[in-house]
Each structure stands twice: as structure tokens, then as C-alpha cells.
Image (tube, rainbow, N blue to C red):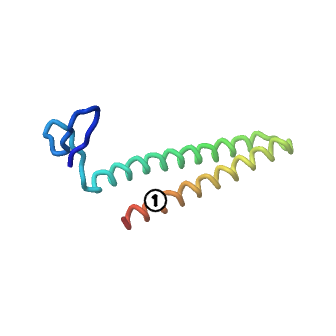
Amino acid sequence: MKWYFAQKVIDAGDANLPQTPVSGAAGQQTLEKILTIAFVTIGAIALLMVVIGGLRYINARNNPDSVKVAKNMIIYSLIGLVLAAMAAVIVQYVLGTI
């Protein structure tokens, strides 16, 4: 196969051109590693936010506004944690079936 760029013929089989892996195994492993790191990071941040929300709840001292903010922080962090876990499971399933 030949490609024409700027009046020069470039042969796809030229030894001087960098070659990329044709098989999807290397790309899939790299994608799995990147997504695993992303989901672990998201989960760690969500868990940290649950802890911070718990500490804010402890320090609310019966102030209704502070208690509400702390409860919302805990609830939304747990929702984020569940969504991150579900996304990780879905991605692993999709990558496993390909």
C-alpha cells in the first residue's frame, strides 16, 4: 500500500517507518492498566470524601445546616463510590468479552 503526501511516495512496508503492534492484546492490556488506575483513584477520592464528611458530621455540634451538609457529602460520596465500582465492572466485562 502506498500513500502520497506532499508529492512524495511513502511505502507502508518501509523499514524506516515506526511499526505499531497490530494485535489488540498490547493495546487492551494498556487500556486495562490505565482504567484500573483511574477507577482506583476515583474510589480512593470518594472514600476520602466519606471520611471527611464523617468528620464534618462529628464536628457539626447539632447545627442543622452543618449536619445537612455533612450528610449530603457522605451520601454523594457513597453514590460516587458505587458508580465508580459499577463502571469498573462494566469496563472489565466489555474488555473481557472483546
The residue tagged with tag 1: helix, strand or loop?
Answer: helix
Judge from the rendering whether residue 79 lies leftward or rightward of residue 30; answer left or right: right
Q: Residue furthest front?
A: 7
User: Which residue corresponds to mark 1?
Assistant: 91
**97 and 74: which one is in front?**
97
Q: Residue furthest bottom?
A: 97
Q: Residue at coordinates 28% horizontally, 36% vertically from top-left?
A: 5
Q: Residue at x 24, y 53 (%)?
A: 22
**Image x and y of residue 14, in percent:** 15, 41
The amino acid type found where label 1 is placed reads Val
Instruction: Please name the residue shown 49% across and 62% down the image.
Output: 90
Percent across and percent down for residue 67 are: 80, 45
Q: Quadrant of residue 69?
A: top right
Q: Is residue 12 above or below residue 85?
A: above
Quick one: quadrant of the C terminus? bottom left
Residue 2, quarter of picture: top left
Position of 59 with respect to 90 (left or right) is: right
